[in-house]
């Protein structure tokens, strides 16, 4: 073994894949590279046919992920000036729940000529929200039957997850469903490409696959949901599990040729981009909440005890680090909302809008917004909800709305933090990670709105560093994730402190947010649902 061993971490985000080369002894990032996905998010038309996709669809093309292995990994090695022979292992993380319908050998169905023109044969990205009607039925039936797993998901299963998307496939594309041998998380599919064998990671199986206490939803439940769907678990989903930090296998000769890494090195079990970030931020103790802020925000926090938190995404035993209950919550749209507004309406850069918005006092724009442009993941778990900006006048400028949207996402995070605390999972430290940490105004707003000092993860590529940490554990360089996190992870404490005058002003605006939140989100006025149904009906009629 080399005197100074290295590991590689690769983070597969929504728009790109990022690779880092990391020193095992101290977590120093020696080199990195990014590859944008060639097809990005396929949400308007299918590249193979040019056919328009219905609203709420979001697909990806799996060969784009392999391109990241072929390009970003060698480029990161070159950037680091690293000798590949020094690399002990590789770890990966992925967005989730991002699902690949695959054959028995892992070939994505969209790569078979007979399915290339069928949108259902492509990867359904986490933010594919067309399975909301299926999610609604799952929730209704689970509630009626008193299914014990439902409270582990805050009382609601999301349309983003494995069962809702699986039921959508079963009902809307029976031919693709029948040809699907494995309904695979992309997190596991990429590990399959690296090792040549399929290992299902315990993290996504728990959070997105309704695996609780070793059991999936019963055949009986699935039959009642939709006759014929009862064999979904046995036929498509169930597969031997790998625990976080375990070795899934070793790098194949083919993957070694793609990446420039040595054949036979350790490949870590797959993981979710959010959960893998906790060790990168050294946040492996109860109460340390990590918010990974990118296109969306995921919130992960460990707890010593099992609690039922309304509207959380889930609680999984060992879901973040072995030995603790891992809790997850999230906001489906954050950077995506800012990007949508900046691109379609303001036609200005984030930097310019931020510069103008930063000149304002709290409340100066006279606006309050709801951050539901991509639906609400926590705490309402409803993707038929949509965005709102209240208070616009002819004097309202683009930077005013932009700032109101930044603030709305901060209010959404406060709602989540308060809900955790009320359920007995107090948040003692808020640590932020992800691409949005570069926006200092946004960070200050989060400190002011939550009234918590904000720590910032030490790495600009925290999920990729987290994957590298898992690679080091899988390679046997550390006994467990906690030890590896202590040596390789980092966070800067209290980088943004709440400003008391802002805190008071935001308390008042948060009260307005809460009123709107409950009015539109908890059934007082169902206008958003009616509009979503109408939009869906028109799209259906057209297709
Ligand atoms: N300066 C900025 N301020 C606010 N949002 C930004 C800024 N720059 C990029 N974004 C948004 O951040 C998101 C990308 O976040 P990033 O963490 O890089 O990616 P990912 O979520 O795919 O991991 C995009 O949705 C984009 O609109
Ligand atoms: O829900 C998730 C994890 O549980 C998704 O992976 C996440 O929301 C998408 O990540 P990103 O915003 O970094 O692209």
Image (spheres, rainbow, N blue to C red):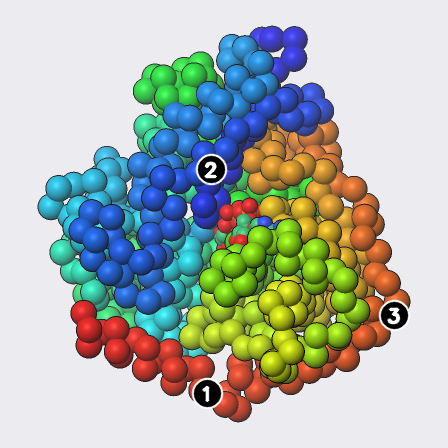
- In this rendered view, identify the residue nearer to me: 362 or 540: 362
Quarter holding the C terminus is bottom left
x and y percentages locating residue 207 in the rendered image: 48, 55
- Mark 1 neighbour density, 10 Å: few (under 14) some (14–19) many (20 or more): some
Relative vertical location of residue 208 with respect to residue 82 in this rendering, above or below: below
x and y percentages locating residue 530 in the rendered image: 38, 85
Q: Is residue 162 visible?
A: yes
Sequence-wise, the earlier of marks 2 and 1 is: 2
- Mark 3 neighbour density, 10 Å: few (under 14) some (14–19) many (20 or more): few
The residue pinned by badge 2 equals: 17
Tell me the mark number nearer the camera, choosing from 3 and 1.
Answer: 3
- Mark 1 near ligand 2 (CB under 8 Å)? no
Quarter holding the N terminus is top right
Sequence-wise, the earlier of marks 2 and 3 is: 2
User: What residue is shown at x 46% (from left), y 41% (from top)?
Assistant: 16
The residue pinned by badge 1 equals: 526
Judged from the image, the secondary structure of the residue bearing numbered disc 2 is strand
- In this rendered view, identify the residue nearer to me: 440 or 272: 440
- Numbered marks: total: 3
Residue 501, disc: 3
Residue 304, quarter of the rendered image = bottom right
Which residue of the protein is positioned furthest toward the left in this rendering?
114
Judged from the image, the secondary structure of the residue bearing numbered disc 1 is loop
Sequence-wise, the earlier of marks 3 and 1 is: 3
Which residue of the protein is positioned furthest toward the bottom in this rendering?
524
User: What residue is shown at x 54% (from left), y 77% (from top)?
Assistant: 388
């Amino acid at each position: 073994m080399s005197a100074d061993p290295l590991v590689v971490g690769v983070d597969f985000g929504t728009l790109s894949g990022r690779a880092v080369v990391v020193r095992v002894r101290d977590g120093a990032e020696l080199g990195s590279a990014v590859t944008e996905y060639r097809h990005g998010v396929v949400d308007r038309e299918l590249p193979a046919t040019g056919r328009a996709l219905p609203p709420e669809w979001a697909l990806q093309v799996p060969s784009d992920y392999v391109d990241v292995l072929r390009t970003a990994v060698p480029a990161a090695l070159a950037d680091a000036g690293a000798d590949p022979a020094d690399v002990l292992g590789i770890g990966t993380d992925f967005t989730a729940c991002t699902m690949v319908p695959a054959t028995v050998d892992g070939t994505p169905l969209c790569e078979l000529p007979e399915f290339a023109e069928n949108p259902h044969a492509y990867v359904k990205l986490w933010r594919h929200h067309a399975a909301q009607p299926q999610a609604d039925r799952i929730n209704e039936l689970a509630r009626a039957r008193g299914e014990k797993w439902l409270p582990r998901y805050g009382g609601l299963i999301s349309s983003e997850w494995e069962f809702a998307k699986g039921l959508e496939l079963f009902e809307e594309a029976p031919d693709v469903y029948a040809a699907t041998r494995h309904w695979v998380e992309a997190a596991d599919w990429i590990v399959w490409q690296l090792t040549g064998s399929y290992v299902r990671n315990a993290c996504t199986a728990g959070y997105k696959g309704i695996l609780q206490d070793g059991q999936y939803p019963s055949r009986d439940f699935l039959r009642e949901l939709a006759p014929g769907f009862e064999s979904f678990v046995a036929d498509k989903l169930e597969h031997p599990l790998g625990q976080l930090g375990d070795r899934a296998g070793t790098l194949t000769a083919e993957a070694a040729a793609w990446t420039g890494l040595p054949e036979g090195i350790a490949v870590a079990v797959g993981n979710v981009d959010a959960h893998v970030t906790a060790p990168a931020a050294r946040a492996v103790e109860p109460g340390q909440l990590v918010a990974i802020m990118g296109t969306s925000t995921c919130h992960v926090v460990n707890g010593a005890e099992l609690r039922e938190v309304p509207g959380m995404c889930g609680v999984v035993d060992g879901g973040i680090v072995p030995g603790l209950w891992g809790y997850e919550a999230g906001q489906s749209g954050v950077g995506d909302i800012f990007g949508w507004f900046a691109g379609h309406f303001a036609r200005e850069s984030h930097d310019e809008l931020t510069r103008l918005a930063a000149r304002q006092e709290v409340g100066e724009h006279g606006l309050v917004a709801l951050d539901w442009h991509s639906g609400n993941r926590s705490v309402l778990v409803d993707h038929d909800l949509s965005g709102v900006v209240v208070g616009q006048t002819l004097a309202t400028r683009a930077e005013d709305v932009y700032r109101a949207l930044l603030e709305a996402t901060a209010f959404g995070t406060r709602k989540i933090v308060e809900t955790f605390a009320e359920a007995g999972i107090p948040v003692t430290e808020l640590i932020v990670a992800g691409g949005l940490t570069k926006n200092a105004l946004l960070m200050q707003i989060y400190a002011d709105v939550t009234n918590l000092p904000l720590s910032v993860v030490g790495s600009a590529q925290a999920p990729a560093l987290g994957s590298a940490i898992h690679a080091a554990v899988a390679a046997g360089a550390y006994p467990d994730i906690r030890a590896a996190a202590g040596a390789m992870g980092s966070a800067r404490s209290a980088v943004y402190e709440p400003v008391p005058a802002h805190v008071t002003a935001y308390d008042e605006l948060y009260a307005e947010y809460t009123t709107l939140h409950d009015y539109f989100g908890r059934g007082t006025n169902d206008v958003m649902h009616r509009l979503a149904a109408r939009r869906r009906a028109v799209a259906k009629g057209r297709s």
